[in-house]
Amino acid sequence: MKNSTNKFRGKNNKEYKKNSDFGYYSKNTNRSEKNDRSFNNSAKNKKVENLKKNDENNTLKRRNPRFLSNREFPTKNSDMHQEFINKRNFDDWIWGKHSVYEALSSDRAINRIWCTSEIFSSDKFYILLKDLKLKGVLIEEVSWNRLSQLTYGASHQGVALQLACSKTISLEQLIDFSKLNCPNPIIIALDGITDPHNVGAIIRSAEAFDCKGVIIPQRRSAGLTGTVAKVAAGALEHLHVSRVVNLNRALEELKKNGFLVVGLSGDGQISISNFQEKAPLVVVVGSEDKGISLLTQKKCDFILSISLKGKTSSLNASVAAAISLFHLTGK
């Protein structure tokens, strides 16, 4: 009995081993192994596909490194380049030596000029550029690469310009015109207002309140661009604008011709509603963040403030200009 039981146990052990090796559980293990193999094969295939995609991207980067490294200024022949040009309005831009020279020689209004040092010092352009600079046109000497960035890779030949939407007059002409048939004219002077929307809104208010002109400095100010003309809503066609090289020197010249210079500031000691002076006035409006510069404040005869009753501590520059003109023209 002992041997039989041992044999029986041995058979059972063998059968158990067989069953464990080749029975129900063995079929599941085979299926799991097949699933593992198929999963591994699919993972390998995905890895291969990802490697192929990475290789393709790397080859694209190596083929066209300029396009990817400088996304703002893609290559000239690409569709992206044309899209960038269409997005930026170049209707008022002219570039190229011959085109720019003809524009400078004509009587067209010019807002800004960019040129290389070679163009500025050349015999063909030097006298024209120097005369325009004295008239208040902003001229910047830039590098060739910077000019290529501004024109998005166009064939600029070292010079480009932006046309103005309206012609400007000299300060002397503005003074003579303002005193014509008007005993107490008002002129607006802008100090550091670089937002074209504010400049356009101030021009619109100035014309509406019968101001005789607007003075814009050559630097730190928005020029007479298309945006300014659009916001001005036609007022620019009926208002004289003088663009001066130095605003402080212009204020001194206006003082010599009998003008009082008043500046608008939240720190002004005199409320504009209490200001009773009757004389030719120059109203200086500063930028929203910095206000009127300290040097320009020293040129002012009076610093006026607008009384505010709410919790808001300051006003938009164009709104402040409109309120001040309402008070000053009603006296």
Image: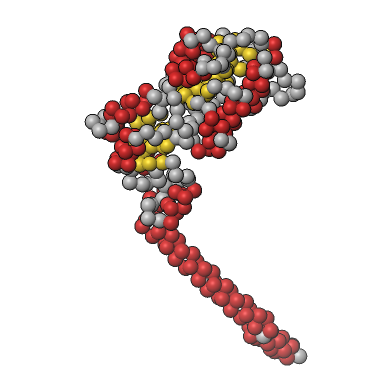
Taking depth in this image into account, of 32 and 51 the one nearest to the observer is 51
In the rendered image, which quarter is residue 30 located in?
bottom right
In the rendered image, which quarter is residue 14 located in?
bottom right
Q: Residue at x 37, y 30 (%)?
A: 140
Taking depth in this image into account, of 80 and 278 the one nearest to the observer is 278
Give x and y (percent) for residue 139.
38, 29
Give x and y (percent) for residue 220.
48, 26
What quarter of the picture does the C terminus occupy?
top right
Q: Residue at x 37, y 33 (%)?
A: 107
Q: Residue at x 47, y 36 (%)?
A: 165
Left or right of residue 311, residue 21 in this image: left
From what the image shows, is residue 4 above or below residue 297?
below
From what the image shows, is residue 101 above or below residue 313?
below
Q: Residue at x 55, y 38 (%)?
A: 230
Give x and y (percent) for residue 145.
35, 40
Give x and y (percent) for residue 284.
56, 18
Q: Residue furthest left?
A: 123
Taking depth in this image into account, of 266 and 177 the one nearest to the observer is 177
| Number of residue marks | 0
